[in-house]
Image (cartoon, helix red, strand yellow):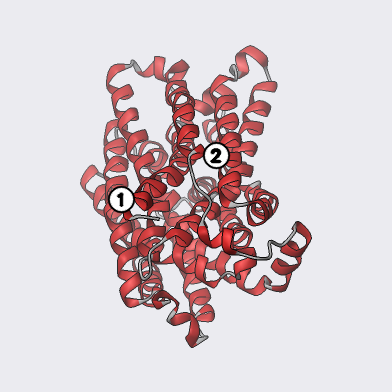
Amino acid sequence: MTRAGNIKAVFRVVSGNFLEMYDFMVYGYYASAIARTYFPSHNAYASLLLTLLTFAAGFVMRPIGAIVLGAYIDHHGRRKGLILTLAMMAAGTLLVAAVPGYATIGALAPLLVLCGRLLQGFSAGVELGGVSVYLSEIATPGHRGFYCSWQSASQQVAVVFAALLGLMLQRWMPVQAMYDWGWRIPFIVGCLIVPFLFLLRRSLEETEAFLARKHRPDVGEIYRSMITHWRIVLSGMAMVLMTTVSFYLITAYTPTFGKEVLKLSESDVFVVTLLIGLSNLVWLPLMGALSDRFGRRILLIACTVLALLTAYPVLHWLVAAPGFGRLLGVELWLSFLYASYNGALVVALTEIMPVDVRTAGFSLAYSLATTLGGSSLAISQWLIHLTGNKAAPGLWLSFAALCGLVATMLVYRDPRRRNMHRE
């Protein structure tokens, strides 16, 4: 594949990542409005928590999607699987966008929204893995980290786009109209993007690495192989926890944390979220390229240690005197840690997984971690309520960093894995 062909392939394959993360961001951004529409309650905390738990429910489906759809992709090919996951994501998005509120159809409303989130979660369970493996297999020698970083970078474009749309709606629409029906507009926009994304994905070519494989394991062989390699899957899960917790805290949870906990203006928190998306977009490819040069291990260890030392102190400093400047400063620091870590993590996970279960193994490890990391919105809100400490999300991030540090040390005990970036 030529250089121009590679660039086009990268753009086509990460397009579905954009839709997946856009939907997740929009749900997080408008959690308060969704709570009023589908989970009305006299207790505002209970209503918001139910909404965030429904958000988290999508992540519970990810491991199932990883196992089922991951095996499909490893057997039938990267291209077919990525088209299938996009179709499922689109259906889930349409369902959330179109369901009438609780006042119209009663308890059926939150049930249908939950179904939409479960469908999104099922498809997303293998989307990241499928995209990451595809990118690693089309990468030019010595540039796998840079190529794989665009999996996460495409998500940041979704963060920026969703934040910009939120800012425009916040300026143009009255607050009450936004809570009544305006929050649906971003979901509808997501549905309108779907046909364009399908056109991009349909033109994908299968990777040469997959076509060159003489043996394509069936579903039973793939599942047996994952059981055989359970240690590396669990280690991968622990490594991913750091990246998922930090990502969802600095993106999806920022609007809720800023408005409901810190009592900042809606425009302030959307501006911060927009700048975080841009920060992530800059750092991710850069750190992916650095991991190609210096190795994955050094970046993974450095970032987890820094997160352990600083996550809680910077949040404690923020909540002591909440303001736009402090929120932006803290989020930019956490953005640097997230992007530096993730720039090395994604490609590392594709390298340590056995070839015959590369998509399924990657997706299962990532999905298991995301089940916890994606629940960070609900976990953080619960920790604040339980402890009365507004900086409590920093403790959750510190725990995730510790998991990542220990797992990284275990995975790279084998000296051969330390030099995989040179292969």
Q: Is residue 390 visible?
A: no
Q: Identify the image quadrant of residue 189.
A: top left
Query: In what element is the residue under mark 1?
Result: helix
* Residue 134 x %, y %: 50, 55
**Residue 310 tag number:** none
- Residue 280: x %, y % from top left: 32, 52
- Residue type pointed to by label 2: Leu
Categorize mark 1 by other alpha carbons within 10 Å: few (<14), some (14-19), many (20+).
many
**Which quarter of the image is occupied by the C terminus?**
bottom left
Residue 239 placement, left or right of 268: right
Q: Residue at x 59, y 62 (%)?
A: 365
Query: Which residue corresponds to the image point at 66% horizontal and 32% vertical from the top-left?
Result: 115
Does 55 sit left or right of 266 as displayed? right
Number of on-image labels: 2
Q: Which residue matches tag 2?
A: 52
**Depth check, front residue: 239 or 286:** 286
The N terminus is located in which quarter? Answer: bottom left
Query: Eyeballing the image, is 233 above or below 15?
Result: below
- x and y percentages locating residue 287 in the rendered image: 31, 64
Rendered residue at 40%/70% (across/down)? 304
The residues bearing labels 1 and 2 have C-alpha atoms spaced at a distance of 26 Å
The residue carrying pointer 2 sits among few (fewer than 14), some (14 to 19) or many (20 or more) residues within 10 Å by Cα, namely many
Instruction: Name the outermost residue toward the top.
Output: 104
